[in-house]
Amino acid sequence: MRIISLIFLLAICSNNTFAQRLLHSSDIPVQKLRIIPEQLRGGTVSEQLSDLEYIPLNSGKKDVISSISYVEIIEDRIIFFDYQNGGVFIFDFKGNLIKRLKEIDGYKRKNDWRNYRLEKVGNHFNIIGQSLKAQFDKNGGLIELDQSYKFDRSSPKTKVGSSYYQSSPLFIAMDTIADYALKFQDSVLIKYDTRDSIKASYTPYISLVKVSDNKAYAVFENTYQLFELGEKGIINRKQFIFPLKNTIDTSEYIHFKDSRKSYDFLTKNRSKIFGVGRPIPYKQYLILYISSLGSSSWVAMNLETNEIINLNKILPDKSNDYVEFLDHNFLISDGEYLYSCIYPNSIQSAKDKSREESHELRKSYQEFAKSPNPILVRFKLK
């Protein structure tokens, strides 16, 4: 049974020049959601957030996170995948390091960690790579090791319920366009318009985003579209509509065969939005990341009140000692809380602002500046 929500329902505006670039069934229910970036409100931490908590990630000097590639939450554990420094870090929500997996027992890596990925399945997680699918419990205990697993790094499969989805980038070789954009099991649900010849994407979005065991999103960021996926197929299509000044005209952009020309166009039109993705369902909100060269930000769409909050416009205040709370690259949810991070070098700006406001930065926050790791941030939207 298809699920149709009427929030933000709008007719297509005549000034919306972002043409259809995907071929799919016209029977898919569509939600047309209008966002006006300049009118999005922010506020302050005390107005918009509750239960804000900073959690230092405590580990030894040899166990330092240098790059956050993937993050998953399993019950009372938060799991970081670091392809640069190598391996998996498992922490509890007090910031204690439970385990670090630098290597996998019984498996010899054939290349560096950037060729692997982390995925959550139920109450365990998998590390997947070339000829590898290793299953672990939440504490890093090895459950099963499969060295015959075939992993397609460019078009990985994503399990939703008992079904599988697979997406493909537009170009699978220099001048070869993929014959599908999204598959469900062995059936092609979405295809690329072969007239579309742009060769580059300027966002780091993952094309298939799994948000629960039974739900995922297919992300087509250049088209301002998300497809909500369930166990039996596509549930609906979300089409985001922006004002003309923020919308890319496909006649100027999509048909560029030279990706450098596309980039030059974006640098001259910094208000143009070139990506919508990273969907996070959170309580009554749908959170998205909107990208332009002029201003990129997380936005939270309240599906009950139709209000949209720009999370990057929420300003630290006296209630949290003017300490930042949000990272552009890292935001996830466990359904109850949102999680992000800050870095030790951001504490100096909080010290400076506190001094300007004749406010004393609490000692525990001052200690964050000495942390070798990012500081985990946990909070709720009001």
Image (cartoon, rainbow, N blue to C red):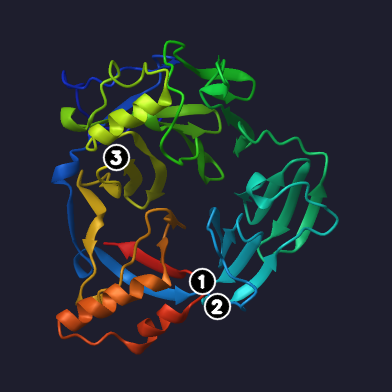
Mark 3 lies on residue: 292
| Residue 120 visible within the image | yes
CB atoms of marks 2 and 1 within 8 Å = yes
| Residue 225 visible within the image | no
Q: Residue at x 20, y 27 (%)?
A: 10
The answer to which of marks 2 and 1 sits earlier in the sequence is 2
Q: Tell me the tag on residue 373.
A: 1
- Could you tell me how far apart the alpha carbons at marks 3 and 2 are, in whole angstroms? 35 Å
Task: Tell me which amino acid carries mark 2.
Answer: Asn
Q: Position of residue 68 (x, y in %)?
A: 53, 57
Mark 2 lies on residue: 58
Q: Nearer the viewer, mark 2 or mark 1?
A: 1
Q: Please tell me whether mark 3 sits on a helix, a strand or a loop.
A: loop
Q: Please tell me whether mark 2 sits on a helix, a strand or a loop.
A: loop
- Could you tell me how far apart the alpha carbons at marks 2 and 1 are, in whole angstroms? 8 Å
Q: Is residue 129 above or below residue 86?
A: above
User: Which part of the image, by quadrant, shows the C terminus?
Assistant: bottom left
In the rendered view, does 22 fall on the left or right side of 47? right
Considering every residue shown, the one lying at the far top of the view is: 195
Q: Residue at x 67, y 33 (%)?
A: 152
Q: Position of residue 280 (x, y in %)?
A: 41, 47
Q: Nearer the viewer, mark 3 or mark 2?
A: 3
Q: Residue at x 69, y 50 (%)?
A: 112
Q: Please tell me whether mark 1 sits on a helix, a strand or a loop.
A: loop
Q: Nearer the viewer, residue 247 or 224?
A: 247
The answer to which of marks 3 and 2 sits earlier in the sequence is 2
In the rendered view, does 77 fall on the left or right side of 132? left
Q: Is residue 99 above or below residue 307?
A: below
In the rendered view, does 107 fall on the left or right side of 322? right
Q: Position of residue 118 (x, y in %)?
A: 62, 50
Q: Nearer the viewer, residue 327 or 185?
A: 327
